[in-house]
Image: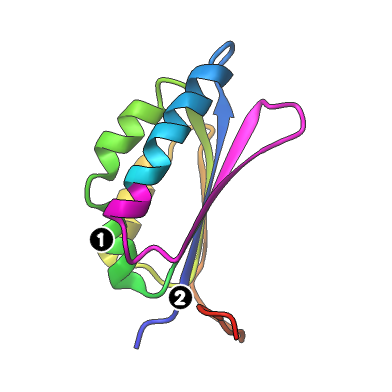
């Protein structure tokens, strides 16, 4: 069985695009929640200066991450009107398809950090 994967993406907000970005985020989050039932955690966080946003996703396994990446190009195109990628981090081993896509998304000023080997840990999907 594949282990959980944590995916973190950090983006710079384009000048003057904060309000538009927040509106897009409010519109897209319910669509992601409904359309990505295998994603167990998704949240976005602004830095104090509101110049950078970081998104955190948790997937129970590589298959769930693959499902998330279906349609990701369309979602990214919309988001990239307001943000510019800065860094991607993957904790856990994604599929070859996702890894290739992430490597293709990197370039000047965009880093990819992969920490594929889990040392130890647990995930609690339900309380109680």
**Regarding mark 1 in the picture, which secondary structure is present there?**
helix
**Residue 117 percent location from the top left of the image:** 52, 78
Residue range of the region highlighted in magenta in the rendering: 32-56
Mark 2, residues whose alpha carbon is within 10 Å: few (<14), some, or many (≥20)? many
Q: Quadrant of the C terminus?
A: bottom right
- Of labels 1 and 2, earlier in sequence is 2
Q: Secondary structure at mark 2?
A: loop
Could you tell me which residue is drawn at 66 percent across and 26 percent down? 51
Q: CA distance from mark 1 to mark 2?
A: 14 Å
Name the outermost residue toward the top: 16
Q: Residues within 10 Å of mark 1 (few under 14, many from 20)?
A: some
49 drawn magenta: yes
38 vs 26, nearest the viewer: 26
Residue designated by label 1: 67
Horizontal relation, residue 66 to residue 119: left or right = left
Vertical order, 41 against 82 (above or below): below
Please give the count of numbered marks on the rendered protein: 2
Residue 31 placement (x, y as % from top left) = 32, 44
Q: Is residue 8 above or below residue 38?
A: above
Residue bearing the label numbered 2: 4
Query: Quick check: 102 left or right of 116?
Result: left
Q: Residue at x 69, y 27 (%)?
A: 50
Direction from residue 37 to residue 14 in the image, left or right:
right
The location of residue 107, given as percent across then percent down, is 44, 36
What number is the disc on residue 29? none
């Amino acid at each position: 069985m594949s282990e959980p994967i944590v995916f973190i993406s950090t983006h710079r907000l384009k000048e003057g695009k904060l309000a538009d970005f927040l509106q897009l985020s409010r519109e897209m989050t319910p669509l992601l929640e409904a359309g990505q039932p295998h994603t167990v955690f998704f949240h976005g966080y602004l830095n104090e200066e509101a110049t950078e946003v970081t998104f955190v996703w948790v997937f129970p396994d590589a298959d769930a991450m693959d499902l998330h990446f279906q349609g990701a190009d369309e979602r990214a195109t919309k988001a990239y009107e307001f943000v510019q990628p800065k860094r991607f981090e993957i904790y856990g081993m994604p599929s070859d398809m996702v890894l290739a896509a992430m490597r293709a998304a990197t370039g000047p000023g965009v880093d990819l950090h992969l920490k594929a080997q889990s040392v130890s840990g647990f995930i609690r999907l339900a309380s109680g």
